[in-house]
Amino acid sequence: MKNLILFILVLVPFFTQAQDQLHPYLTLEDAARISDAAQAKSTSEGWNMVIVILDAGGHMISLRKMDGVQIGSIDVALGKAKTSVYFKRPTKVFEDMMKGEGGARIATLPNAVAIEGGLPIFKNGIIVGAIGISGATSAQDGIVAAAGVEAY
């Protein structure tokens, strides 16, 4: 009986770890492909941007700061990506809500940046990460974010 219990205690962690790895996730290769597409769109439009890719837990996988972009865009892009991964929606939703009656309450939410340019990234209906873009107008940031997500 003791051997059976010991056997179960030893094997259960292996089975749960294997099960966790069945969930989709962003790889470094995925992040590079998304960032490449976003940078290509940004370059083709003549916009200098910061491109941030986060995993589903809000941890940074990659950050690109194009030449000439203001350093303040680093924190803004990171904030947009965090908002999208934490709330599982585009930051444009929050921007639009700010314009409505009582919208100022959005500003009190932790980790909510209400500026277009952040998009969640889903695979098979499961959030796997987010992209955050900053460096131009919010609408232009949104265009570049969409180009990146489309490449995934």
Image (cartoon, rainbow, N blue to C red):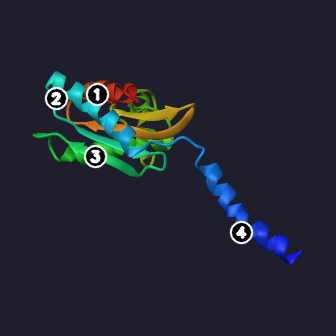
Callout 3: helix, strand or loop? strand
C-alpha span from label 4 to label 3: 39 Å
* Closer-to-camera residue (120/128): 128
Among the two numbered marks 1 and 4 on one chain, the one whose residue lies closer to the N terminus: 4
The residue carrying mark 4 is 10
Q: CA distance from mark 2 to mark 3?
A: 16 Å
Find the distance from the CA under tag 1 to the CA under tag 3.
14 Å
Contact? badges 2 and 1 (CB < 8 Å): yes
The residue beneath circle 2 is: 47
Left or right: 19, with 56 as reference point: right
* Residue designated by label 3: 63
Crowding around mark 2 (Cα neighbors within 10 Å: few <14, some 14 to 19, many 20+) is some
Q: Amino acid at mark 3?
A: Leu
Dot 4: element: helix
Q: Tag 2's secondary structure?
A: loop
- Amino acid of disc 1: Val
- Asked whether the residues under the numbered discs 4 and 3 touch, taking CB atoms below 8 Å apart as contact, a structural biologist would say no
- Mark toward the viewer: 2 or 3: 3
Q: Is residue 123 above or below residue 55?
A: above
**Above-or-below relation of 71 to 100:** below
State the residue position of label 1.
144
Based on the displayed image, in which of its 4 quarters is residue 150 positioned?
top left
Q: In the rendering, at what x and y percent does residue 52 appear?
A: 31, 42
**Which residue shows up at 48% across the image and 50% down it?**
57
